[in-house]
Amino acid sequence: MINIEKINDVLIVSMETENKLNVALAQKFKVEVAKIIDQPEMKIVINLGGVVYIDSTGFGALLSILRVAKSNNAKLKLCNISPEVMELVKLLQLQTVFDIRNSVDDCLKSF
């Protein structure tokens, strides 16, 4: 379900085949990503490229992952958010909660 790539000291997490983060996938996604944020001060990028829809459980999973990251003093960034998903992010006013960048490269440069 998720793909993990390491570039220098940054973990890049992306969804392999799914284009939605919804009730059917959110719990599993949250558990899998939370498992890898097991060390303090990690740097994590969640690449949402290809994801065209996130429902409330999906946003809940992302917020839960952010809480786990903050409790471990980790840095979490999101990138490659589709215009459709960005509309929802803005509607929910989450653009002030998450560090959102345009691309993985932008995220890597910002750490």
Image (cartoon, helix red, strand yellow):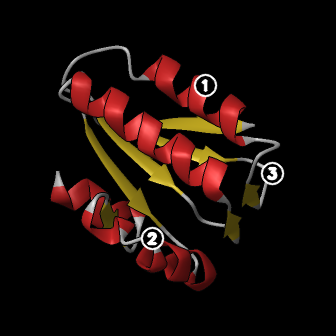
Q: Indicate which label's residue lies in the foreground, 2 or 1.
A: 2
Nearer the observer, disc 2 or disc 3? 2
Q: Which sits earlier in the primary sequence, circle 2 or circle 1?
A: 1
Q: Quadrant of residue 11?
A: top left
Question: Dot 1 corresponds to which residue?
Answer: 32
Q: Earlier in the sequence, mark 2 or mark 3?
A: 3
Crowdedness of circle 2 by 10 Å Cα count: few (<14), some, many (20+)?
Answer: few
Quadrant housing residue 102: bottom left
Name the residue located 70 percent from the left edge and 72 percent from the top edge. Answer: 52
Which image quarter holds the N terminus? top right
Camera-side residue of 94 and 81: 94
Amino acid under disc 2: Leu
**Which amino acid type corresponds to the residue marked 3 in the rendered image?**
Thr
Whole-number angstrom distance, CA of label 3 to CA of label 1: 15 Å
Q: Residue at x 67, y 48 (%)?
A: 15
Q: Is residue 55 left or right of residue 61?
A: right
